Amino acid sequence: MSTGPQPSHPSADHLRFDRNDLHRFMQTAWPERADAYDPDRFSIFEPSACRYHYPVGVDDLRPGETVSGPTLMRLADTVAYALILGHLGDAALAVTTSLSIDFLRRPVGPVIVTDCQMVKLGRSLAVFRVAMVSTADDGEPRLDRPEAVANVTYSLALT
Amino acid sequence: MSTGPQPSHPSADHLRFDRNDLHRFMQTAWPERADAYDPDRFSIFEPSACRYHYPVGVDDLRPGETVSGPTLMRLADTVAYALILGHLGDAALAVTTSLSIDFLRRPVGPVIVTDCQMVKLGRSLAVFRVAMVSTADDGEPRLDRPEAVANVTYSLALT
Amino acid sequence: MSTGPQPSHPSADHLRFDRNDLHRFMQTAWPERADAYDPDRFSIFEPSACRYHYPVGVDDLRPGETVSGPTLMRLADTVAYALILGHLGDAALAVTTSLSIDFLRRPVGPVIVTDCQMVKLGRSLAVFRVAMVSTADDGEPRLDRPEAVANVTYSLALT
Amino acid sequence: MSTGPQPSHPSADHLRFDRNDLHRFMQTAWPERADAYDPDRFSIFEPSACRYHYPVGVDDLRPGETVSGPTLMRLADTVAYALILGHLGDAALAVTTSLSIDFLRRPVGPVIVTDCQMVKLGRSLAVFRVAMVSTADDGEPRLDRPEAVANVTYSLALT
């Protein structure tokens, strides 16, 4: 069987992994965290954008039933990592180099919709914008009123 | 003459200054910088959003005809300040408390379209997201491919 | 019984809680997280500065025995929160408003020394600088070669 | 004449340019900005650290005689760029990829002492911490009470 040439570099317009490939990859590469990449919880997984619906757990709450800051930071990092892996496939390594987050409103859950846009996929860096907002289990997210917004940068080392 | 009650706090849904009020205010408050608030250069100036078309000058360029980083940082701060002043009017004071910016692609001008969204107007802080992209003089901005994105936070002291 | 006047505002030069007060406070206010404020793990707890020695757990590791980014973000937030609580005592409320972190080198543990400096204690905001570096259990931290540095800002609401 | 081998990569422990080399380089590479790299204004210029004494000009002031935010952002970027050029010499290219700054206290000048530490010099990124504080013309800077602190990251492309 003959296949065409592989693209020399990941592209912002093309995914190498879909959400199921991603989940299978994580089950092998990091099984303890694979549940955080549940394919059924991505309502969007396409080139340069994804959206994840995260169910808040009891360990995620601070007193007063507020979702904790570290939960939101981990979620921003996790969902951006899902999208960069989608673009890179398993032929590459991505490492978070910086993350900045603004906490804007009190997050209460029970679901945190996490919306991720890739704003740049460069030769050595990829940059993401992440917005997070609480919804009811079946609600529409009010992404114009996010509870937190984050910028996440990954350094890429192609193998 | 009778006027209705004034709102007790600035609102994300209501401007106290339009782009002409803003310009007049700056001509009095800070005349040396009033040109940076030219009302004709705002293509959008509405509650929670504005867009400014900045003509790159010779002092803004680095070698290689690249728009300098400090020019973009000043522009992000200026346009976010325009929008917070629109919301606050002159009955308040706003001071930048933090700014973070990611430089994504090489900006070349000749115009930098600067798109500003207010993501929060709180009691003591206001947070803005700013995206900047080069266009031709009469071109459509490619805001999905920004050259820089910034988050700007102002501390508010109501008078 | 008569007591003297209370200071009207927390001071950068004075702690209201020492590390034991802090731990007792957390045991009541947020018992699930009180272990993260173990008084014996602070080698420094003084006005404007503290240092915490965090033992890396198995859940903190990524594949390759690297301490995960979310672990470091949570740690930066936790140690800065310890210090602001030390300054505020229980008569106040502090909420993280922003956090930015740069990941510089691969952290491996087994202990992460987390060094926190308060760079500002204002009327409405407090700002911290946090540096994190791996050490052996009894080693000296190489704080000139941090693995991550973070800036953390809290909004203060005095009660 | 025979010279030994050149190091294959810039080192955090070694400068390729001293402050005079830097100034001469800027006079050729970017003459309009060379004055910002006046060798006599660096009180420190050594591996991984430099300190610049910037005289505030009339254009740098906002109403109320406050040094403007954009002046401080440009200064942070300029001084960090001086130090990375010192390490790289002219055999390399450095581009700012991100800058974040916290404004902590009102800067009044007449001199802004700008203290820069390199916290990482990696293969593809260099990260700097910058603190800025006002002094009298001949005063000692109170670097424990900075008016602004910034983190600046450069992307390196070795030529």
Image (cartoon, coloured by chain):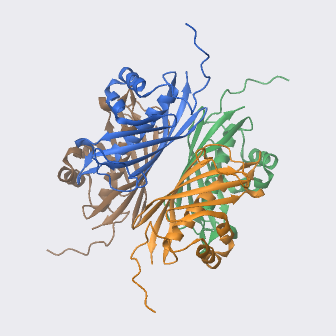
Chain colours: A orange, B blue, C green, D brown
Q: Position of residue A133 (x, y in %)?
A: 64, 50
Q: Position of residue A14 (x, y in %)?
A: 46, 70
Most foreground residue, B51 or C86: B51
Is residue D71 visible in this depiction of the protein?
A: yes
Q: Quadrant of the C terminus of chain A?
A: bottom left
Q: Residue furthest top?
A: B1
**Residue D140 vs residue C143: left or right?**
left
Query: Which residue is drawn at the image coordinates 67% and 56% (left, top)?
Result: A71
Most foreground residue, C49 or C94: C94
Q: Position of residue D66 (x, y in %)?
A: 40, 29
Is residue C140 visible in this depiction of the protein?
A: no
Query: Which residue is drawn at the image coordinates 59% and 76% (left, top)?
Result: A21
Instruction: Relative to D21, say whether A3 is above or below.
Output: below
**Residue C157 vs residue B154: left or right?**
right
Most foreground residue, C48 or B118: B118
Instruction: Relative to C103, say whether B37 is above or below.
Output: above
**Residue C7 vs residue B67: left or right?**
right
Query: Which residue is drawn at the image coordinates 47% and 34% (left, top)?
Result: B83
Query: Which residue is drawn at the image coordinates 28% and 63% (left, top)?
Result: D92
